[in-house]
Amino acid sequence: MATKKIKIPQLSGKEIRHLKGLGHHLADLAMIGKEGITPNLVKAVQDNLKAHELVKIRIQDTCPLERKDAVEQLATAASAAVVQILGKTALIYRPNPDLDEDRKITF
């Protein structure tokens, strides 16, 4: 079974500001913990990105990686773009062309 390669989106400054505003009120949907980036975490983030396009991630103090490195590795593994890293929280985004029009994030 071949996996479909998804292109990581390049975001403009205007798009990043819009996504930051949308992500402010989101709840954390994933956490990077003491085991770092695991296949189960990547799968969970991919599933959430498919359903929501924008995902907020919490980085625990026990994460063995630096925050920026952990988020970038997770975003790359999930074929997503890092929108923001602020403290122990990060936002990542990946558009889903199969999502209903009323649920898609539009710029």
Image: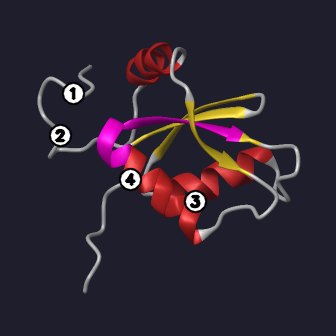
Residue at mark 4 to residue at mark 2: CA–CA distance? 12 Å
Which residue was labeled with disc 4? 47
Magenta span contains residue 52: yes
Q: Earlier in the sequence, mark 4 or mark 2?
A: 4
Amino acid marked by disc 2: Leu
Q: Earlier in the sequence, mark 1 or mark 3?
A: 3
Which residue was labeled with disc 2? 99
Quarter of the figure with residue 37: bottom right
- Packing grade of label 2 (10 A; few <14, some 14-19, many >=20) is some
Q: Which residue, as the protein is rendered here, is positioned at the far bottom?
A: 1
Residue visible at 53% across and 52% down in the picture: 75
Above or below, 79 relative to 104: below
Amino acid marked by disc 1: Arg
Q: In front here: 15 or 33?
A: 33
**Cβ–Cβ under 8 Å for marks 2 and 1:** yes
Give the magenta part as a residue range.
Answer: 49-58
Residue 102: where, in percent of width, then height? 14, 23
Residue at mark 1 to residue at mark 3: CA–CA distance? 24 Å
Residue visible at 82% across and 50% down in the picture: 66
Residue 41's tag is 3
Q: In front here: 33 or 66?
A: 33
Q: Which quarter of the rendered picture does the N terminus lie within?
A: bottom left
Amino acid marked by disc 4: Asp
Q: Earlier in the sequence, mark 3 or mark 4?
A: 3
Q: Which quarter of the rendered picture does the C terminus lie within?
A: top left
Which residue was labeled with disc 1? 103
Give the secondary structure at mark 4. helix
Residue visible at 55% across and 26% down in the picture: 27
Residue 98: where, in percent of width, then height? 14, 46
Magenta span contains residue 101: no
